Amino acid sequence: MTLPEVQNAVIEKRICILIPTYNNEKTLKRVIDGVLDYTEKIIVINDGSTDSTPQILQQYPQITVISLPENKGKGNGLKIGFRKAKEQGYHYAITIDSDGQHYPDDIPVFAEALLKENKDILLIGNRNMSQDGIPKKSSFGNRFSNFWFWFETGIKLEDTQSGYRLYPLLKIPKKYFTPKFEFEIEIIVRTAWRHIPVKNVPIKVLYDPAERVSHFRPFKDFTRISILNTILVTITLLYIIPRNFVNNFKKKSFKRFIKEDVLESDGSNRTKAFSIALGVFIGFSPFWGFHTLLVISLSILFKLNKVLAFVASNVSLPPFIPFIIAASLFLGSPFVPGESNLLSSELNFELIKNNLLQYVIGSAILATSMSAICGIITFFFLNKLNPENN
């Protein structure tokens, strides 16, 4: 894009540039000067810097500066910046780090991508993490983050840790729970949960150890990120995936849902059959209360069809539970010494407690046999419908 085109895009889409900074006196001026080549719509959040940052910012009366009395973390600074940007009427904010690793001349990349998409979208700069000079810990951390982002949203990205981003200010969540580096993970996951597309755009990156000042604390921040991902994964398994499943079902007729989301979903007939088998196995297994967590986790682990597995796991719906318990106790009885007077006993959890080994053995037999039967029937049924999808 030419400079006038970028400037027009900034005005048309109401874009501002957000620069959080903390003790980056060596690189801050260069970053601001580079951004000013494209626009003066800049908001800088001085997050309690103790170096010459305030003096540097005094040289730029044309930009908005928010100075915080003490350092409270990048996430906190970004939240304050987002609020200010919305107050000033902006719809999008491009965030760029002040440590010099990002090139302001990549601003046109974000503007062009936004114009091309022509809809609300969250864009993340995709750095070349394999180039010379990239610290190995940064490359590993990015791969780690990419995996969990995919697990939590189903979206595959090559870079989820870059701070060079374009945020749709009117679509991101209004409240957040993290104040520091982990905030940048929270916001992209929760925005994706709102069904806002999240995509990468190619950018350049510079790692200069002589200039760059990193405030990332490996142990503390990695621990905070790990705790956040644990929470996000739990929410994904227990709420987001079931919610999306129900919403997809509500939006379509039953026939269309089966056709589009089940029969024509990704995977071969064999994969779909294994998915049904897994769901049935989990549904008949005695892990009450953990069926959804187990079936989704194992579906992801073995790259199976999550929708089919989840549907199949519902063989253990409440009306069917008494029959499952009775069948499990019956199948387990030959393997446990003594007589089990099941016919004369009331079917309840006290009975299971008194015949626990018998119930566990029977559950394993029932789950395995029904899983195999349903998987085989599903495979032959799908193979008859679409024999080429093997």
Image (cartoon, grey):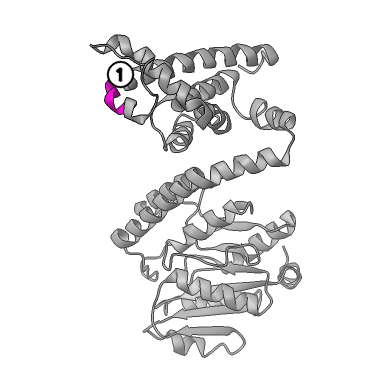
Residue 354 magenta-highlighted = yes
Tell me where residue 197 appears, x and y as whole percent.
Answer: 64, 52
Q: Residue at x 44, y 84 (%)?
A: 53
Query: What type is the residue that disc 1 sits on?
Result: Gln
Magenta extent = 352-357
How many numbered marks are there? 1
Location of residue 22 (image quadrant): bottom left
Between 139 and 221, which is closer to the camera in this rendering? Answer: 221
Neighbours of disc 1 within 10 Å: few (<14), some (14-19), many (20+): many
Q: Residue furthest top?
A: 334
Tell me where residue 58 appears, x and y as whole percent.
Answer: 51, 90
Q: Is residue 102 visible?
A: yes
Q: Residue at x 30, y 62 (%)?
A: 220
Q: Is residue 135 visible?
A: no
Horizontal side of 340 relative to 325 (left or right) equals left
Q: Secondary structure at mark 1?
A: helix
Horizontal side of 149 relative to 349 (left or right) equals right
Q: Residue at x 39, y 50 (%)?
A: 230
Between 35 and 336, which is closer to the camera in this rendering? Answer: 336
Residue 245 magenta-highlighted = no
Q: Residue at x 42, y 38 (%)?
A: 289
Horizontal side of 311 relative to 251 (left or right) equals left
Between 130 and 267, which is closer to the camera in this rendering? Answer: 267
- Please identify the quadrant where the N terminus is shown: bottom right
Between 15 and 125, which is closer to the camera in this rendering? Answer: 15
Tell me where residue 260 appears, x and y as whole percent.
Answer: 70, 31
Q: Residue beneath label 1, please?
A: 358
- Please identify the quadrant where the C terminus is shown: top right
Helix, strand or loop for the magenta stretch, by majority: helix
Q: Residue furthest left?
A: 337
Tell me where residue 247 appears, x and y as whole percent.
Answer: 65, 43
The answer to whether residue 28 is above or below residue 162 is below
